[in-house]
Amino acid sequence: MTIKRVRAHHLAQMKAAGTPITMLTSYDAITTRIFDEAGTDMLLVGDSYANVMLGFDSTTQVGIEEMVLATGAVARVAKRAFVVADLPFGSYETSPADAVANAVKLIRAGASAVKLEGGVRMAPTIEAIVRAGINVVAHIGYTPQSENALGGPRVQGRGDGADQVRKDAVAVAEAGAIAVVLELVPAPIATEITQDLAIPTIGIGAGEHTDGQVLVWTDMAGMTNWQPSFVKVFGEVGQELKKAAEAYNTAVRARTFPDDQHRFDQ
Ligand code: KIV
């Protein structure tokens, strides 16, 4: 299937056709251009922006203003990818009306959908945003914004917890979500949910049978010293960037840059 610009119905068609959906996080214009040209189907302006780009130790540290700024940067550059923006912690839990108002800000910034965390408990909020004509991607399983309540990153849906994850998946689909992220869900449960739901599932640490996969781009590109066990490093971009910076520093200190080939002609 050749898609000029990925839209919500294409995601449904990809699920129906068994075509895996690719999603990466992106937070700025420069990496968005690269991921978009690489043919990534979905770009997530995740609230991991807080940890990855702003140096905070929790996703709860970004607010709607920062997310609007990052979403604009990504949306202005993405030509093909479907841009999803995270509703940050505190921007949607207070009431469905607050959720709609903040979702509108992200859509105005250029997102094609908003993402929020929570299953059964967030179903009325998802319904309200969908009623406002806005696409919603749900996020269940391990939900980083509730890290304190959940006791840190841990698999959700083992043993008795499996039933809650199944109920969450059904609730967000019935509320009108166009897709659901399954984070740190045991692979057999993620597989079962993927088979049962009509909407696409996007897994992260949820095994290989979800309809799509998402990773934080800095993890998969080797920009960090540590990655979770479910992450594969697909390129050592961090090391290459360090090498480039070292070579530049060396050349400037040796006065071999600028040279005759790199002057601004006056
Ligand atoms: O913010 C984020 O990066 C996310 C992914 C982990 C799915 O929500």
Image: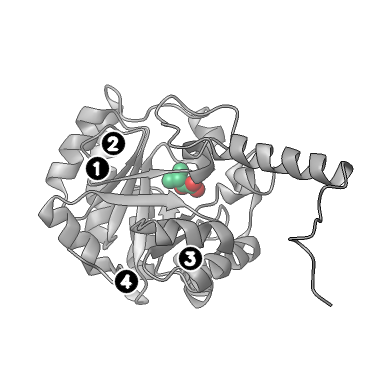
> In this rendering, which labeled residue sits more in front, label 4 or label 1?
4
Residue 112 occupies quadrant: bottom left
**What residue is rendered at 31% in x and 29% in y?**
157
C-beta proximity under 8 Å, tags 4 and 3: no
Residue under the point 39% across and 28% down: 230
Q: Which residue is mark 3?
A: 99
Q: Is residue 214 above or below residue 67?
A: above
The answer to which of marks 3 and 1 sits earlier in the sequence is 3
Q: Is residue 196 visible?
A: yes
Q: Amino acid at mark 3?
A: Ala
CB contact under 8 Å: marks 2 and 4: no
Q: Residue, x 68% and y 43% (percent of image)?
A: 244
Mark 1 vs mark 2, CA separation in Å: 5 Å
Nearest the viewer among 232 and 235 is: 235
Mark 3 or mark 2: which comes first in sequence? 3
Q: Position of residue 136 (x, y in %)?
A: 36, 63
Residue type at the position of mark 4? Arg
The residue beneath circle 2 is 164
Q: CA distance from mark 3 to mark 1?
A: 22 Å
Q: Secondary structure at mark 2?
A: helix
